[in-house]
Image: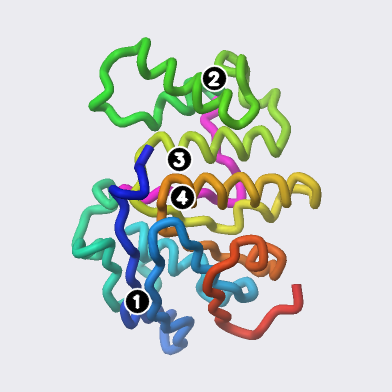
């Protein structure tokens, strides 16, 4: 996992996204390591599209411009697989053909060759979020909150340089939502990852702290 000393600020400079003749958003912001920038707006306002632009998987139907810098590195000129972007979506997206531990091992960088070390890293990651002994479990036997924790640890073990959160709490019930928010934001801070959260839920923004930018019509979540 990245340490705070190895991460750098994320800067969005005049990032503009359009769909046809319609301007969806225009944003400039800097996110320091360990901080969370929240982008809040209703469905269709371009929140997830912004994350797609940063991550390098923007649908060609959209036209985007502007710089996305991670420290001195221009992410827009970097292939997606080299951006080292960690992403959490609404759904955990665990691989059904792999065990719980196998899902995490899959994300560990290939530079770590030893199977024993890779398994130990995965087991330690599971134990760190209260899932010790779950390595060989079928993902389908997990609750929604447990799946969310596995997805988070899978992302963190991939050694990302930044974290993008695409409404990852929206499908959890209220009790699990608060618990998972606290876990995700604490892990992002401890890893020193500049983080962008997109949401339509004001409670997510409050929990995240940091800067809040509204786009589209203001919500009353």
Could you give the CA–CA distance between mark 2 and mark 3, rounded to whole angstroms? 16 Å
The label nearer to you, 3 versus 1, is 3
Q: Where residue 46 sits: x, y (%)?
A: 51, 73
Dots 3 and 4: beta carbons under 8 Å? yes
Per the rendering, the mark at residue 63 is 1
Mark sitting earlier along the chain (3/1): 1
Compared to 14, does 61 lie above or below? above
- In this rendered view, identify the residue nearer to me: 124 or 25: 124
- In this rendered view, identify the residue nearer to me: 204 or 97: 204
Q: Residue at x 62, y 25 (%)?
A: 139
Per the rendering, the mark at residue 155 is 3
Could you give the CA–CA distance between mark 4 and mark 1, rounded to whole angstroms? 22 Å
- In this rendered view, identify the residue nearer to me: 218 or 116: 116
The verdict on residue 87 being magenta is: yes
The label nearer to you, 4 versus 1, is 4
Q: Which residue is mark 2?
A: 99
Dots 3 and 1: beta carbons under 8 Å? no
Tell me the crowding category of disc 1: few under 14, some 14 to 19, or many 20 or more residues within 10 angstroms, Cα based. some
Could you give the CA–CA distance between mark 3 and mark 1, rounded to whole angstroms? 28 Å
The label nearer to you, 1 versus 2, is 2
Mark sitting earlier along the chain (2/3): 2
Q: Which residue is mark 4?
A: 87
Tell me the crowding category of disc 4: few under 14, some 14 to 19, or many 20 or more residues within 10 angstroms, Cα based. many
Tell me the quarter of the picture where residue 214 sits: bottom right
Q: Residue at x 27, y 74 (%)?
A: 67
Q: Which residues are magenta?
A: 84-96
Dots 1 and 2: beta carbons under 8 Å? no
Tell me the quarter of the picture where residue 146 sits: top right
Q: Which element is circle 2 on?
A: loop
């Amino acid at each position: 996992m990245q340490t705070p000393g190895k991460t750098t600020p994320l800067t969005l400079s005049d990032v503009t996204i359009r769909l046809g003749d319609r301007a969806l958003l225009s944003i400039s912001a800097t996110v320091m390591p360990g901080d969370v920038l929240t982008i809040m707006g209703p469905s269709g306002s371009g929140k997830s599209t912004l994350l797609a632009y940063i991550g390098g998987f923007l649908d060609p139907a959209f036209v985007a411009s502007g710089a996305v810098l991670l420290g001195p590195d221009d992410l827009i000129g970097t292939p997606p697989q080299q951006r080292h972007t960690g992403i959490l979506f609404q759904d955990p997206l665990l691989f059904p053909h792999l065990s719980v531990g196998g899902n995490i091992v899959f994300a560990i960088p290939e530079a770590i060759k030893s199977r024993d070390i890779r398994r130990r890293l995965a087991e330690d990651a599971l134990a760190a979020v209260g899932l010790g002994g779950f390595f060989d479990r079928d993902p389908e036997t997990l609750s929604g909150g447990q799946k969310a924790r596995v997805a988070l640890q899978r992302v963190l073990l991939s050694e990302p340089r930044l974290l993008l959160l695409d409404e990852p709490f929206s499908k959890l019930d209220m009790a699990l939502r608060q618990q998972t928010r606290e876990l995700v934001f604490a892990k992002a801070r401890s890893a020193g990852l500049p983080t962008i959260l997109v949401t339509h839920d004001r409670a997510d923004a409050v929990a995240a702290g940091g800067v809040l930018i509204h786009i589209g019509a203001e919500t009353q979540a």
